[in-house]
Image (tube, rainbow, N blue to C red):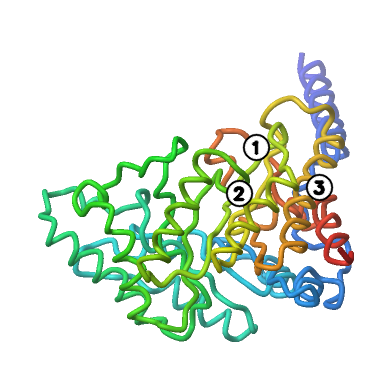
């Protein structure tokens, strides 16, 4: 009996050791490397090529990867001459309590930009979203909301006077049907909140470039036409505004049309306004569009078309992608599924979209 037990114990130990050895020999699924595997020189970076074309190449910057990922910061400084804080300047982030502002993140980014000769596009001063709860905790009078909005705008703009290249002053004020969006500002102040926001911003920093920004406004249709009329009205009333931002969050089933882009940009140029692509990304999971490789090619075509429109239209001064690596993108949080909407993959490898932008910037039109 003892011999059988001893034999069973030996067999058990040998089997266990064999199993452990077998399991350990199976390679684990590797984590994506954070190290770029392709060397890109500063002379062929998007930043360098864009400056030769007279176009600032920019990106949105999120604070978590900015703080923790040295490669994120390295690619940011090599590739881009503009940074746009993705969330740090939003009302709820920077003004969480009525009598308190939190400038921790924005001070950090502005100082970083200055140290690396990068311009800052601050986004947004007036928006219907990302508002703090305290704005809804009581019924404010029109006069109170006017005071709150003016204080918010001028506190931010005055603090960074001379350090912010451009402000998105008002964002997404127009519905797809061309009507003004129902917001806390429209309901309680009236349409003049738009004029006032631009005036207050200009008062606080007369040198900053002031923009209106929106989505689905870059080609033609009821919304872009309504935006054009709004811009024309602002200019006729002497409101200080310098340009329009096209957010351009796109997907493969809605590819950009070069002729429509150029036509819309040209009519804004005729008003004397700059245009900038301000939040570009291209989802590849939305809709049906072949294999992943085919989707990446179509994505590259979309990026290239948008930038080509910018290059050939003299009033287009910047092209800003909304993040640059698929490792950190807002799209999964928006759609609930993983995507690859940006120009570098999760391991900072340039994608076909990156090379499409390079090709456009190297071309003559």
Identify the residue at image location x=40%, y=59%. Answer: 233
Q: Which residue is mark 3?
A: 300
Q: CA distance from mark 1 to mark 2?
A: 26 Å
Disc number at residue 338?
Answer: 1
Q: Secondary structure at mark 1?
A: loop
Instruction: Please tell me how crowded label 1 is: few (under 14), some (14-19), or many (20+) other residues with Cα within 10 Å.
Output: some
Q: Is residue 61 above or below residue 20?
A: below
In-image side of 143 versus 54 (left or right): left
Q: Nearer the viewer, residue 231 or 86?
A: 231
Q: Is residue 191 above or below residue 71?
A: above
Identify the residue at image location x=83%, y=77%. Answer: 42
Mark whose residue sits in front, 2 or 3:
2
Instruction: Please tell me how crowded label 3 is: few (under 14), some (14-19), or many (20+) other residues with Cα within 10 Å.
Output: many
Whether the residues at callouts 2 and 3 have beta carbons within 8 Å, the answer is: no
Q: Position of residue 154 (x, y in %)?
A: 30, 75
Q: Which residue is mark 2?
A: 218
Whether the residues at callouts 1 and 3 have beta carbons within 8 Å, the answer is: no
Examine the image and state in which quarter residue 205 appears.
Answer: bottom left
Of callouts 2 and 3, which one flags the residue occurring earlier in the amino acid sequence?
A: 2
Q: Is residue 305 above or below residue 313?
A: above
């Amino acid at each position: 009996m003892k011999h059988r037990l001893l034999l069973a114990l030996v067999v058990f130990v040998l089997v266990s050791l064999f199993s452990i050895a077998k399991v350990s020999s199976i390679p684990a699924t590797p984590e994506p490397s954070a190290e770029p595997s392709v060397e890109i020189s500063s002379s062929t970076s998007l930043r360098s090529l864009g400056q030769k074309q007279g176009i600032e190449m920019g990106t949105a910057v999120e604070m978590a990867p900015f703080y923790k990922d040295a490669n994120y910061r390295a690619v940011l400084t090599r590739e881009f001459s503009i940074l746009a804080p993705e969330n740090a300047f939003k009302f709820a982030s920077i003004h969480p309590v009525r009598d308190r502002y939190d400038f921790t993140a924005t001070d950090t980014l502005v100082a970083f930009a200055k140290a690396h000769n990068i311009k800052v596009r601050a986004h947004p001063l007036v928006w219907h979203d990302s508002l703090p709860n305290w704005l809804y905790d009581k019924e404010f009078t029109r006069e109170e909301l006017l005071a709150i909005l003016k204080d918010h705008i001028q506190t931010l703009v005055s603090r960074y006077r001379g350090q912010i290249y451009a402000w998105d002053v008002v964002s997404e004020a127009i519905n797809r049907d061309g009507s003004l969006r129902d917001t806390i500002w429209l309901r309680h102040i009236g349409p003049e909140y738009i004029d006032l926001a631009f005036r207050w911003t200009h008062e606080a920093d007369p040198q900053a470039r002031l923009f209106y920004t929106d989505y689905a406004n870059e080609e033609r249709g009821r919304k872009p036409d309504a935006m054009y009329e709004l811009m024309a009205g602002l200019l006729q009333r002497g409101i200080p505004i310098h340009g329009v931002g096209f957010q351009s969050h796109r997907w493969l089933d809605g590819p950009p049309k070069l002729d429509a882009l150029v036509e819309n940009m040209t009519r804004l140029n005729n008003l004397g306004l700059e245009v900038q692509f301000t939040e570009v990304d291209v989802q590849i999971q939305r809709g049906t569009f072949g294999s992943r490789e085919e989707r990446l090619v179509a994505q590259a075509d979309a990026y290239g078309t948008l930038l080509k429109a910018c290059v050939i239209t003299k009033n287009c001064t910047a092209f800003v992608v909304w993040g640059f690596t698929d490792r950190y993108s807002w799209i999964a949080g928006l759609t609930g599924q993983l995507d690859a909407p940006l120009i570098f993959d999760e391991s900072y490898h340039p994608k076909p979209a990156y090379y499409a932008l390079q090709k456009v910037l190297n071309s003559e039109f």
